[in-house]
Amino acid sequence: MTQDKFNSTRHYTQLTAEDRGVIEGLHHTKGFSIRKIAARLHRAPSTISRELNRGKTRQLRSNYLSYEAYYADTAQILHEQRCQHDYCQLHLKGRWHFFFNWLTAKVKKAKFRLQSIDGYCHLFKRLYPAHACPSTPTVYRYLDRGLLPLDNTILPEKLRRHIKHAGRHRDRRNKRLAGTSIEQRPQAVNERKTFGDWEGDLVKGKRVVNEPALLTLTERKSRYELIYKLPDYHAQTCLDVLQRVINSKGAKWFHSITFDNGSEFALLDRVKGTQIYYCHPYTPSERGSNENANGLIRELIPKGISLHHFSKTYIHEAQKVLNGRLRKSLGYRSAADVFQQFSQPRRTVQTPVATF
């Protein structure tokens, strides 16, 4: 085989795991030089030389003296790691270059994080169908490996997740419910088949009863969010504000609302125009849509900060951002679009944030 053939990239192929096994066996056999190994594998001597240099690892003898040796398994692992890095760099600079630049600009320039990573991927596909777009898990992997000028701080939900431990569940179902139990809620509501069924809760800044709070209402079918600022979170205040919301928007919007069993909601069974249901004590998962929405609100309004510092305009903008996000559960439509479809198909829905 001529040297010209070795130098031709047209005939070059990567060393396989079997080739590396042969290299290890011959390299450890007396009398086999690099050129003889290359001739046996029909490779260029430079290829074998580079492979031996790149695949060597430091070993420790029984007398604690170190030495370098070539082992096929280790060399194969190192090769795969290099290929993975080269693959990532290739797509950063080539195939997905436009998408990653677009994503970086969107995230860094936005006052709020307008979409989830999944939402950004599908929005990009809508806006630029001719450009290649990676999958959502691929973007997460790039973030984890530090290959983008972004990091996981843009994913607060991911950062605050805790590993669940077995054997720490407590049975607290004996606490008295404030009103009608969620167990009596119709199956059609549980399966999200009907429109106008809501979940509600309070988002608090400082946990002082006379501090302002946010009453958040999430429509179960569309995931549409309404946010109202309360001057405090006394039970009577929650009752008065919720009644004003229902009166102002119309009972046709509110077939039912499900709250937790907190003391601030103890008077809500007196509300007129809708049916109030109460979750089991200490079971926020029974209001999963609202809990998820409250977690997104925490990106914009962190815990421990008084809500006196957040204006009506800011809260309205936050509500608009949440309702404009593309959601996988809605087929990558926004909550605002789905809500408009079911509530007022022929008119634009306007839901200003009220402060009472």
Image (cartoon, rainbow, N blue to C red):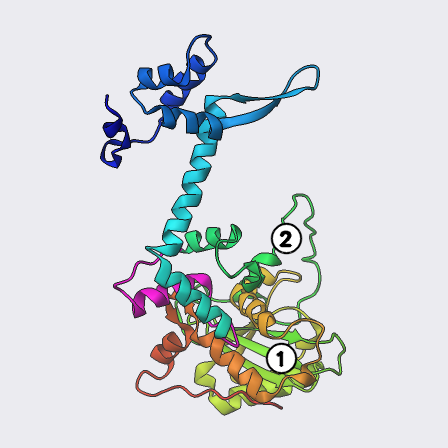
Query: In the rendered structure, does residue 20 fall within the stretch colored magenta?
Result: no
Crowd band around label 2 with a 10 angstrom C-alpha radius: few (<14), some (14–19), many (20+): few
Say which amino acid is labelled 2: His
Q: Which of 262 and 21 is in front in this view?
A: 21
- Residue 162: image tag: 2
Say above or below: 95 vs 179: above
User: In the rendered picture of this protein, how many numbered marks are placed on residues?
Assistant: 2
Residue 255 visible at all = no
- Left/right placement of residue 331 relative to residue 63 reads left
Q: Mark 1 points at which residue?
A: 214
Dot in front, 2 or 1: 2
Picture residue at 37% right of the left edge, 52% below the top: 91
**Image coords of residue 145 (percent x, y):** 51, 50
Name the secondary structure under disc 2. Answer: loop
Say above or below: 42 vs 224: above
Dividing the picture into quarters, in which one does residue 236 lie?
bottom right
Say above or below: 75 vs 241: above
Say which amino acid is labelled 1: Leu
- Left/right placement of residue 199 relative to residue 342 reads right
Residue situated furthest top in the rendering? 30
**Image coords of residue 99 (percent x, y):** 37, 62
Q: Nearer the viewer, residue 264 or 224?
A: 224
Q: Which residues make up the magenta segment?
A: 110-135
Q: Which of 15 and 190 is in front in this view?
A: 15
The Cα–Cα distance between marks 2 and 1, rounded to whole angstroms, is 25 Å
**Image coords of residue 149 (percent x, y):** 50, 61
Picture residue at 45% right of the left edge, 62% below the top: 117
